Amino acid sequence: MDAPLALYRRYRPETFAEVIGQDHVTEPLRHALAANRVNHAYLFSGPRGCGKTTSARILARALNCEKAPIADPCGECQSCRDLARGGPGSIDVIEIDAASHGGVDDARDLRERAFFAPVNSRYKVYIIDEAHMVSPQGFNALLKLVEEPPPHLRFIFATTEPDKVIGTIRSRTHHYPFRLVPPKTLGDYLLQLCEAEHVALQPNALPLVVRAGQGSVRDTLSVLDQLLGGAGPEGVTYDLAVQLLGYTPDSLLDEVVDAFAASDGSTVFGVVDKVIESGQDPRRFAEDLLQRLRDLVIVAAVPDALSKGLLDVPGDRAERLLSQASNFGPSELTRAADIVNAALIEFRGATAPRLLLELMCARILVPGSDNSAQGFQARLDRLERRLSIDGGAPAPAQAAVPQASRPPVVEPVEATPAPVAEPVAEKPAPVAAPVAEIPAPEPPVLEPGGSPTSSSSRGSERTPDPDAQVLSTSSRTEEPAPQPADPMPANGTLTIADVRRLWPEILDKIRDLRRFAWVMLSQNAQVTGLDGSTLTIALVNAGARDSFINSRSEEYVQQALHAVLGVTWKIEAIVDPSARPGAGSSDEPESPDPAPAAPRKGVSAPESVREALRDPVTPETREDPDASATRDDPVVDHEEIDPEDLLSRELGAHVIDESRHD
């Protein structure tokens, strides 16, 4: 008993209707055959195993069918039976393998035999497979024949590399590009073949077969033929497909993905050890992991991807994908996929694949939203900085600042404020000067309940000095309440003070981007204004401004602002000779004459401080070391001293020997 033919030979299509996944080619050809508008030469191009040679044979059958013009061969006439699947073939349809018949001599022989009329058919058809293997000299020898063939002659060129077919030949043919077959179409076709072969195929094994074929029908049928040959009574199982095709089991992929979500390095490297110890290919494991991450990215981006058919997976695996995608963020999944994709390139020709696989897993385990830990740290710092600026997480000391800027509310107590005002007017004038120089009292202390405690309420704990009461009362009545320098910005709004406070960090980022721009800004520039989305930078002279503009340094400033503050602003450079480089890091603009600290309220000055203010102590006069100098003192710089005498007098040295070197 003879062994059966391979699947791709037993199920080779005999009509255009049986060709799958190439409707963009088969439909125009069927219309051209039905209308009898067939060209003298065709060029079929596309990946291997997608139906180029099969379509060429079907076209030849339809051309020589006795019922022509017809869209599909009838299958009943002698020509159709000869060219049918398993038929003897026709003497008028010649297939030539250009890999072994691509020289000038072969082209000349074809040209001599082409002028003979067909024996039994309507046309003599030449199917030249692997046409890109024909040499340029061979194509040039065929050029005149392809351009002006006899009426009974038709050419069909099939190639996987149409660019290697010379342009003079391509321009004289009708070009039909074939494509890879979509996975869903190919999967449905495989199920039909399994039913025809009476072999069961598990649903979770079908995607592995389709994936192994990579869109090529012939390659997919070869893989399925191998699995059918090794299948037992239960048919093609998932375990059989995984073992024969070398794919990573879903259990290992589930384990490593869950470990990545939990940042469990022990489990991740345990899976790597299982992959290596079981003899699996590390590159294949990385490819399978990338495929799983791709599925998770799609599920995370499109929650109903399974119902829409974006993913063709079994039901139990679909539930696992939904569960695993919920444990990741979109940025984490895309970052992990980028790392795995980059690692696949490094696997080519690697001598230590296990090391590369472990490094890949280590990079994925590093927490981050960018391709590196440095990018994550920079982004985290920027988020924390924005939160502190926007008021999202204010510190307790910051929360008390607005309270301190308001005048304290003093509740009425047993103190009598009216009699206190009279001693202020009767105080002698010399007391007024110390009052102005007394340091300002601290703001009212917040009790645990949140209410401010006034000086009068604290008086119940200790007895205040009468003079201190006079001083504190006069400072409270005479000094206005201090107002905040800048109004508090709304949440999410950056002010010029924020930019100046973070300007050193912005300069550090510019230094990492371009050192020339950093040197120019740190030595010649100052932030002077912020108007909406325009930041104004003042440079000390016109030359510095021109260098700043001509070197396109504003682009690096924009990148640094985006990295530090998360904003995209325009940069305007102006000339301001009064600009003070390095002064941009203060919270508020500096003044040439800083005012003394404002007097504090509500705290009495100690007696020792008042004594020091009344009787200031004159600091001791420093003694001038040159006070005793006179005009008659010798000038040491012009004094001529013999070096030998100086060494002998000061150090006790004596001459041992003298040597002259002429």
Image (cartoon, rainbow, N blue to C red):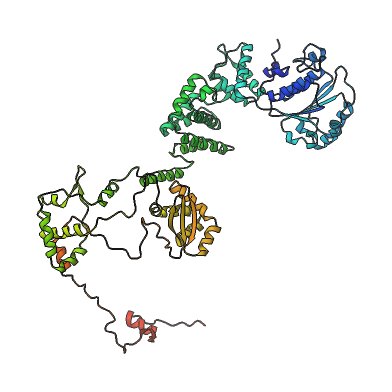
- From the top left corner, tell me how far across and down residue 477 is, in percent: 19, 58
> Does 563 sit left or right of 404 as displayed?
right
> Does 63 sit left or right of 619 as displayed?
right
Examine the rendering and report whether any part of residue 620 can be seen: yes
> Does 461 sit left or right of 536 as displayed?
left
> Does 61 sit left or right of 264 as displayed?
right
Q: Residue furthest bottom?
A: 632
Nearer the observer, 553 or 347 = 553
Examine the rendering and report whether any part of residue 352 can be seen: no
Image height of 600 relative to 67, above or below: below
Nearer the observer, 513 or 634 = 513
Q: How many marks?
A: 0
Q: Quadrant of the N terminus?
A: top right
Image height of 307 relative to 1, above or below: below
Nearer the observer, 110 or 146 = 146
Which quadrant of the view contains residue 417?
bottom left
- From the top left corner, tell me how far across and down residue 525 is, in percent: 46, 60
Which quadrant of the view contains residue 430?
bottom left
Question: Going 69% across and 20% down the picture, which residue do you hit?
Answer: 19
- From the top left corner, tell me how far across and down residue 60 is, in percent: 79, 21
- From the top left corner, tell me how far across and down residue 644 is, in percent: 38, 83
